[in-house]
Amino acid sequence: MSDLDFELQLSWSGTGREGVGRIDTDDLVLELSAPESMGGRGVGTNPEELLVSAVSSCYTAALSGVLRRARLPVRSLAVKATGTVTGFPASARFARIVVTPTVLGGDPARQDEYEAAADAAHDRCFIGRTLTPDVAYEVGAIEVRAGDEPPTLEDADGRPSVWRAA
């Protein structure tokens, strides 16, 4: 087995929730600040969204692999992810992350098999497994659609999210 290293550079100016930052990776630059809901500037992304993104993208990749190995029909996947922070502001902590998958181009008659695949993907997502035991990491009800119409996913402000079919 090989070790894999992932490096990035983070810079921050200002203090506390009023500050802003920037994350530079080999292929991506992200603006970073505390969310407005937590008293920050709400510019770019924030650590909370990044954690939910890391868990949900790992889960989605794991689900894709499990579905392929199970030879279940799938054209593309959409995963809605919700992270809940509790105890703000005095003792803020993540309480829960829920991933809710939708399979497009699937076979609804095989719902039980898709549910088993969704559970298996949960167990295979190594980033989700790194969460502390007091953070609930759950899979919501899987939806299987025979067609290619994406689900209506909205961001926290009720705006439609970006959808790109695989």
Image (tube, rainbow, N blue to C red):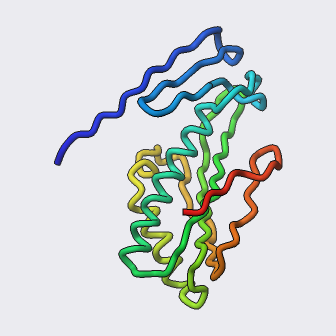
- Residue 130 horizontal/vertical position (percent): 41, 45
Residue 29 in the image: above or below residue 151: above
Horizontal relation, residue 132 to residue 5: left or right:
right
Residue sitting farthest toward the bottom:
109
- Residue 24 horizontal/vertical position (percent): 48, 24
Q: Total number of numbered labels?
A: 0
Residue 107 in the image: above or below residue 156: below
Residue sitting farthest toward the right:
158
- Residue 36 horizontal/vertical position (percent): 77, 28
Q: Residue at x 69, y 18 (%)?
A: 17
Horizontal relation, residue 159 to residue 4: left or right:
right
Q: Quadrant of residue 67?
A: bottom left
Q: Residue at x 66, y 24 (%)?
A: 33
Q: Residue at x 58, y 91 (%)?
A: 109
Image quarter hosting the C terminus:
bottom right
Q: Quadrant of residue 147?
A: bottom right
- Residue 53 horizontal/vertical position (percent): 56, 45
